[in-house]
């Protein structure tokens, strides 16, 4: 039989016969016909070769849906795991939120800027009338070190906001 002949090849079977061949009930065959998974040619009559092709396509599409669902579930599980890992890092102080870092750094740098701007008038009064260069240098160095302690006073707890960890399962669960 050639390819052209196989396209015109028809074998008409009853719903009972096709249900036995496909190993499903006759009511399931009717459902499959409504879903275009088998080819009905008349009341209780089905084109067997075309039904085979249609049923195979139907099963493959169902398999892809199941596969896609399992892949999506795997992605979902991974996302939830990553979220939990990030929350644990935040709780351990190993990870900080960008808005918390910005808040703390703005505060620290603002304070440092203030100390630097206050440095000349403060030090001018201290070094006024001094002639010993070593003494002047030591006073200036002391004032610079005092201003720089603002940057050295790192406290990890400063980086925590009031909402350290939101255990909001709704973010990922829908």
Image: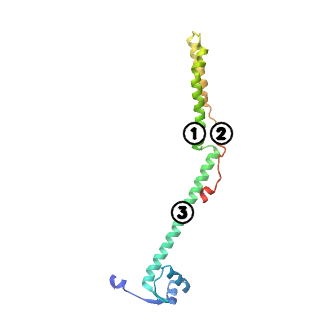
- Looking at the image, residue 14 lies above or below residue 170: below
Dot in front, 3 or 1: 1
Please indicate, yes or no, whether residue 141 appears anywhere in the rendered image. Answer: yes
Marks 2 and 3 in Cβ contact (< 8 Å): no
Q: Secondary structure at mark 3?
A: helix
How many residues crowd around disc 1 within 10 Å: few (fewer than 14), some, or many (20 or more)? few
**Relative to the observer, which residue lies in front, 109 or 14?**
109
- Looking at the image, residue 97 lies above or below residue 9: above
- Distance between mark 2 and mark 3 Cα atoms: 38 Å
**Relative to the observer, which residue lies in front, 22 or 15?**
15
Tell me the residue that label 1 is attached to: 102
Q: Residue 77, position in %: x, y?
A: 58, 59
The quadrant holding residue 53 is: bottom left
Dot in front, 1 or 2: 1
Q: Residue at x 52, y 86 (%)?
A: 19
Q: Secondary structure at mark 1?
A: helix
Specify the color scheme: rainbow
Q: Secondary structure at mark 2?
A: helix
How many residues crowd around disc 2 within 10 Å: few (fewer than 14), some, or many (20 or more)? few
The quadrant holding residue 80 is: bottom right
Tell me the residue that label 2 is attached to: 157
Q: Residue 43, position in %: x, y?
A: 49, 89
- Looking at the image, residue 55 lies above or below residue 86: below
User: Which of the two labelled residues, at mark 3 and mark 1, occupies the earlier sequence position?
Assistant: 3
Residue 72, label in figure: 3
Marks 1 and 2 in Cβ contact (< 8 Å): no
Q: Residue 153, position in %: x, y?
A: 62, 32
* Quadrant in which the C terminus is drawn: bottom right
Marks 3 and 1 in Cβ contact (< 8 Å): no
């Amino acid at each position: 039989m050639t390819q052209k002949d196989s396209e015109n090849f028809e074998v008409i079977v009853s719903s009972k016969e096709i249900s036995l061949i496909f190993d499903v009930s006759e009511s399931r065959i009717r459902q499959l016909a409504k879903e275009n998974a088998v080819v009905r040619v008349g009341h209780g009559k089905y084109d067997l070769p075309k039904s085979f092709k249609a049923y195979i396509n139907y099963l493959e599409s169902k398999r892809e849906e199941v596969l896609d669902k399992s892949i999506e579930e795997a992605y979902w599980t991974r996302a939830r795991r990553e979220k939990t890992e990030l929350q644990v890092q935040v709780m351990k102080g190993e990870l900080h939120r960008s808005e918390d870092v910005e808040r703390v750094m703005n505060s620290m740098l603002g304070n440092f800027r203030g100390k630097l701007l206050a440095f000349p008038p403060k030090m001018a009064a201290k070094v006024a009338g001094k002639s010993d260069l070593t003494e002047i240098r030591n006073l200036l160095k002391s004032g610079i070190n005092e201003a720089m302690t603002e940057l050295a006073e790192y406290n990890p707890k400063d980086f925590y906001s009031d909402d350290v960890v939101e255990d909001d399962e709704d973010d990922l669960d829908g």
